[in-house]
Amino acid sequence: ALSTACLKACLEFAYTGEAEVADEDALAELLAGAAFLQMDELLEAAAEAYVSRLAASNALAVWELADRIGRLPRLAEAAAKAARANFGEVVAGGEAWTAAPASIVRSLLEDDRLRASEEEVYRAGVAWLQAHDPPPGEEEVAALLSRVRFALLPREFLNGVVMEEPLLDTRVGKQMLLEAPGLAIMSTARPRPRTGGMKLYAVGGLSGPGASAVLSSVERYEPATSAWEAVTSMTTARHDLGAAVLDGRLYAVGD
């Protein structure tokens, strides 16, 4: 049943086109109430209010709520994006991560846009599995951890941590590891690194009428947020150049 405060907010919106809520819990109830009462305009307005409040601390809960309501694809994607971009904080949140639905956990662990190292992805999957009592069956364990790109893990981590994990010390778990892309005996292709931790740089170039102006600017694209930003410019304008990264530094060579 909807609370008195929620019903009052729904009526307020119906008459004035605006509604006030006390906190995020009230906003979540208002979202659910708008869906239940089929108040589409209020539902959209509440979803937009949630988009502006998304953070690592609430991304999973909002994602689950949007999925449960089922008519909020933009809110669900915005919450998923916040979770991908702040994965380390999301997992460090403890109960919020371990209580997340399996569908959301699977979606994150297999996402190419996840901003996390493969070690973080593996540890997050194991932490989620270990938090369940009774523990998941070996089929579920293998299905979830198959989202990890094992061939990208450091050899020491693979041998010293993964191969020693009790959850994978099963027939199904061992078979999953044997067949993992890049680890299988007959496998020649390695899985590609996730793009969430990668950045694309546009260095120098030409601009203006007839491409007459040589640029010294450097811009960086962040896949996790789908946004470009200007970073420190070069001291010299260049357009016919090469660029490379070495030890965390970006080098530009040429005119």
Image (cartoon, rainbow, N blue to C red):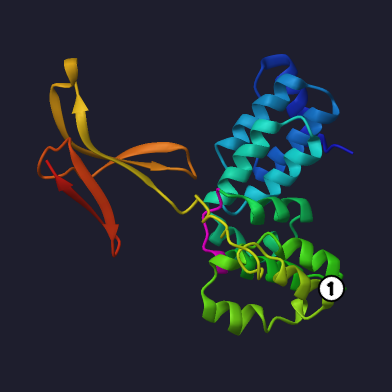
Residue drawn where x is 73% and y is 38% of the image: 66
Residue 184 occupies quadrant: bottom right
Q: Residue at x 68, y 59 (%)?
A: 147
Compare residues 73 and 23 and report the one nearer the observer. Answer: 73
Depth check: 108 or 138 in front?
138
Q: Residue at x 73, y 15 (%)?
A: 15
Callout 1 environment at 10 Å: few (<14), some (14 to 19), or many (20+)?
few
* Magenta stretch: includes residue 33: no
Where is the C terminus found, in terms of image quarters?
top left
Decide if residue 19 is in sight here: no
Quarter of the figure that contains the N terminus? top right
Picture quadrant where residue 50 is located: top right
Residue tagged by mark 1?
135
Asked if one can make out residue 2 in the rendered structure from this viewpoint, the answer is: yes
Vertical side of 214 occupied by 151: above or below: below
Image position, residue 178 (x, y; %):
71, 71
Res 183 quadrant in image: bottom right
Prevalent SS, magenta region: loop
Nearer to me, 86 or 162: 162
State the residue lying farthest toward the front: 186
Magenta-tinted stretch? 113-119
Say if 70 sits above or below 233 in the image: above
